[in-house]
Amino acid sequence: MNTTFEQIQNDHKLYIGSEYQDRISYEVADLIDNKYSTRELLETQMRQLDAPNLTIAGLLFGKMYSVLTMGLFESLVKHDLVIETHPEKIGIELKEKNAMNYIIKEEHVHKATDLPDEKVKEQIYTFITLHLQPLFQTVARVSKCKATHMRSIVSHNLHQRKCALAQTDVDQERLEKVFHWFTSHELFQENRRNPLHFKFRYYKADNGKETYVRRHCCMKYMLHNANKEKCCPTCPLIPDEERDDRIK
């Protein structure tokens, strides 16, 4: 296996290669167009999570989907790879609980430096507008959760990942540029907003630890009988004095 592909697979559950095609549980295009397939997927994850209802399962699907989004982002920044993500080119393999692997053929992966910036931006725009947004809209309709909340969770994880990458030896100028493409309105025509454009409060604890605070709770604590001690350290539901102790 290509060592770069192996690292992307380990870090972001993105499986690149034709040999993985028979592992696909659902095609993304089918999930967007077929609410019955989407309901079947969400009901499976609800059972595996022992979630109290489909709404929680839907929201947590959105949170888990940030793994793919961060994988696309980091592949560009760290590995100089552009991955085509039109819904017809991505498959999902369901795993335990709500874990998912994302499967794509190698022919849909390209060296970014072999392409002009406009082509790279076109792929990011395609992912956001033809893949992520309509998929989340279908999930929201089926599960009765809010697509806005799912998108804000994905955007928050992109912000967190960008901060983590800023502490590494990646090209910092490229990091800022690609992050801007994913989260700003640059790729969108006038009067159209980027669905991943959100502002988050940046919090610095007394002990020096830092994080962005989510705008919306992912509701994972509802898997633990609504015990807020199980809230994430980035959750907006907990006070900052508790956040200090939870930030790693």
Image: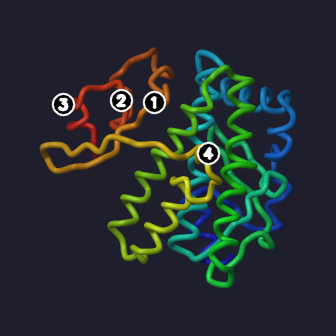
| x then y, percent, for residue 39 | 78, 26
In contact (CB < 8 Å): disc 2 and disc 4: no
Query: Which of the numbered marks, if any, corresponds to residue 191?
Result: 4
Q: Residue at x 40, y 37 (%)?
A: 214
Q: Disc 3 marks which amino acid? A: Glu
N-terminal of the pair, mark 2 or mark 4, is: 4
Secondary element under disc 4, as helix, strand or loop, is loop
Front residue of 90/15: it is: 90
Q: Residue at x 64, y 39 (%)?
A: 96
C-alpha separation, residue under disc 3 versus residue under disc 2: 12 Å
C-alpha separation, residue under disc 4 versus residue under disc 1: 25 Å
Secondary element under disc 1, as helix, strand or loop, is loop
Residue holding disc 1: 216
Residue holding disc 3: 241
Q: Disc 1 marks which amino acid? A: His
Q: Residue at x 63, y 16 (%)?
A: 53
N-terminal of the pair, mark 4 or mark 3, is: 4
N-terminal of the pair, mark 1 or mark 2, is: 1
In contact (CB < 8 Å): disc 1 and disc 2: yes
In contact (CB < 8 Å): disc 3 and disc 2: no
Q: Quadrant of the N terminus?
A: bottom right
Q: Nearer the viewer, mark 3 or mark 2?
A: 2
Residue 117's image quarter? Answer: bottom right
Q: Residue at x 73, y 58 (%)?
A: 85
Q: Disc 2 marks which amino acid? A: Pro
Q: Residues within 10 Å of mark 1 (few under 14, many from 20)?
A: some
